[in-house]
Amino acid sequence: MELVSQHVKGIMEECKIRARDAGLRFDDETLEYIVTNRDLIELSPKMMIPTLYDYWVHDVRVLSGKGMYEAYPSNPFETVVNTRPAISYYNDNNPDWLNVMIFYHVLAHIDFFQNNLFYKNTWDIDLAGQALADKRLIARLRSEKGRWVDYVIEFARGMDNLTGFHRDLNRTFLKTGSKKLTRTDFYFDVFLQKIISVPQHEYVKEISRYNQCQKDNVDFFSQVTGKYPEFNELFRKETAQKSPPQMDIMEYILRYSPFLRKEENEWMKSVIHIVRTTSLYFQPQIRTKIMNEGWASFWHEKLFMADDRISGHETDYAKVNASVTAMPKVGLNPYALGMRLFEHIHEMEDKGRYSFAYFLLKDAVLKKKYDQHKNTGQSFIFKVREDMNDFTFINCFLEQAFVDRHKLFVAGKRINNQNMTWQYYIQSKKADDYKQMVINTLYHPPDIRIDAEKTKDGILYLGHRFENKPLKQDFIENTMIGIEFLWGGPVHLETSEPKSANQLDPRYTNFWDPSAQGPFPDTTAPPIEWQRVRYIIKDRKLHKQEL
Amino acid sequence: MITLDELLERDKKREEDGFKRKIRIGRIVKPGSGNKEKIIVVPTTVEEKFVHDDIIAEQEQGETEPTGGTGEGQEGDVIGEQPIRPEEGEGEGEGEGPGEGKGGEHEIEANAYELGKILSQDFELPNLKDKGKKKVLARYVYDLTDKNQGVGQVLDKKATLKKIVETNISLGKIPDVSNIDTTGFIVSPQDLIYRILSREKEYESQALVFFLRDYSGSMGGKVTQTVVSQHVMLYSWLVYQYEKQVETRFVLHDTEAREVSDFQKYYSYKVAGGTKVYTAFKLVNDIVEKENLARDYNIYVFHGTDGDDWDKDGKQTLAEIEKMLAYAARIGITIVEHAYVGSKHTEVEKYIQSSGLLTSHHHLIKLDVMAENVDDSRIIQGIKTLIS
């Protein structure tokens, strides 16, 4: 691993100037390293951070990574790490023109890391330095406690996908504009709607009365307290109680675990803490993959096409670019999808189509011709890259016009019993279906939280807010064993599972025609019925109860 | 960087600490392009967390998760088909050069040998050699069989004389073959032929292993993984035990059986048909008879299934198995039960148990039943049962 040569660095600095001129914003300092494939294999389990703490699972990944490389050699062009200064890794021996293109791609990634608001909590941390300190601490603990350090890492990592990423982010933003619950807010938002739940017309009436009172300078609440004598008391309670901050499972265990509170187990807290913060650090990256890759591909195309250094390499570029950003016949390519969506948004906004007028337009021909010549697309996509994540990006902008334009469809795969073949077919060309299909691929950990009311008598009670997706059953036992270990007592988990009686006989065949699939599978297959169950782990033994 | 051995050592300690082992081995990374197959043995592990399971959604309609696509066409249009039962050599072109093919195989064996070694040493699978010399298939004898010019242990007089005559003919020292004057002969040191001691391999007998696998529709997911996992390890262990003197044949079956040429195909093929177990056993019997294999080989047959069979009382299967018992050194049947089987027994288990073969031929046929979500240590335990 070594820094790139002065010549290559020169190319990078040149690219920075042009990228800034185009509107990208990023720190001045960046570090570029040349790495071998071997280095890359060894770095990737550590999320490309060379200073990340050691853990045996990383070593397993490296060993299998080497095996994979033997079978399928492949070399990524670049990898960028969200650190300050931003670090990026490159393969050796890229020709200069290719470096120009890759650098534009990398600079757009850095711009994304440093401007997208979901990354806000990573902006003030020197990750490489922090990781190094953590690594040393864990190494020191390991020399004292031996393999128990690895167990604690393992068990902590068993929960590290349930960290309250959005809540932490929310906390950061709220700190900047602190908000206190006012009497008015409480009356309209909580009291009227949740406590006495008035019908809508009364609610509206109260609002107009409030506005009237404001105008006439009359005390609005005198009538309220007259009507509801309990109101003041309720309001006082609400503000006094200042509901305790929601904690995620890891925080809760860190704070309340009787096991960790023992003096000899104190050290485990720092290990759990390290695992938690490391996981949180990478959350925004997981949640902005389509956008981040799309943004980088969008900019490398735009900037490189306008760069004089492309001359003579136009076909080379076309080849490389196509291999990265082509839409596959069957399959999903986040680079390609994100890039096209940014292009689409740019054009739509340029023509002023994100407007009520366009929305109301029903005539397809007029719709096609609709152009307000606003030319605000550029600033608009900068705003999008700042405020959105993959879910909101896809959910807001993936529309029928986009699906039609790029001839997208949802591809299904089914068995054809006559030919004994897998058949790929066009399942749907509707934007909503396509959108749902993409959303289903996004990162979405289950929503599992501490149930504070049921957590008592030494039992940690976890509740899973069910979203019609059951948990992966074979992972439940080991995960719960880990939580039990760190909690130091029994752990309960409430979740939902399909009713077992509902299981279809997989050998079901049509009596008259054994070669046919079950007739009308849509109508005969009853919808899955869900059953609430409770898993209990006690002394490393798992039990299940139906509720 | 930690080595595989150290990882396994660490994994063993987990058991002492009261946790389950986590390292799985024998996962095989699939081949590269063309005919050059590569099987690479790597360790793998899973980090368990609470995550959503997407399998349920898949089962609902017998379809797999939809994905994206682009191109022309209307809703409902079929855009492509792919055979479920892959044909031999399909998409690869015929005409595999013998040199290349052999090279590929060798690589598999070298890796399997390593894995077998690990299994024998780290998982304490029994060593076949400990059970007596008879089972060693190849042995070495030292004999004065090789000839060498100039130096050696014993002078081969006859060969030396021949060589001297040969030399002198070419020198023109023997003008008349009926009247030879040996006094005029010139003897070169290179004419002396010696016998030297050399190591000779003597084959006593060979092991021939048939791997049989159910690849019917019911075998989806975990079950196939477990069966293949066990067969990979079994194969590796045999390769190690027999010093690579093992021949293997691979048979897949749903409602009909077919032989495939290599482990990779055996490992990766999937279909969706029904299940007739007897077809696989019958195919093995036919092969053995046709090629007259019973005379030259110790034959082992291992069969992996989910226990499902259209032949509910196993009449045909049992008949084939009985035929097989006449020549096989060991029949090992593994049943990997789906989770939904519960405490019931599967068809195959029922009819094999009730046939009494397991007791009447207990030294020849073994049965192992396990659940689909077992870990490696249980699979290895199963191997011990099958070969005990």
Image (cartoon, helix red, strand yellow):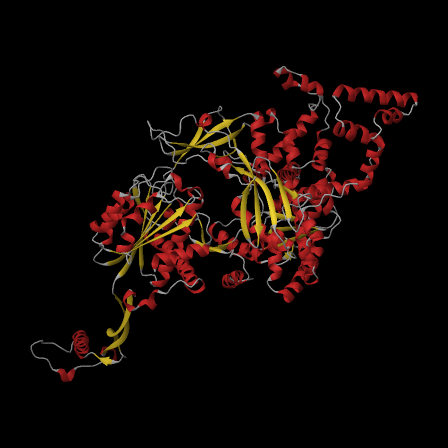
Q: Which residue is depicted at the point 60% across and 58% down?
A: A151
Is A149 on the left or on the right of A208, as rendered?
left
The quadrant of the picture occupied by the C terminus of chain A is: top right
Location of the N terminus of chain A (image quadrant): bottom right
Observer-nearest residue: A6 or B329?
B329
Q: Residue at x 65, y 66 (%)?
A: A144
Q: Residue B144 in the image: x percent, y percent?
A: 24, 75
Determine whether, in the image, residue A372 is placed left or right of residue B200: right
Q: Position of residue B113 (x, y in %)?
A: 39, 60
Whether A138 is drawn above or below A392: the answer is below
Q: Position of residue B350 (x, y in %)?
A: 33, 46
Q: How many marks?
A: 0
Tell me: residue A238, above or below residue B295.
Answer: above
Where is residue A533? Give x, y as percent.
Answer: 56, 40
Residue B387 at least partly seen: yes
Residue found farthest to the left: B178
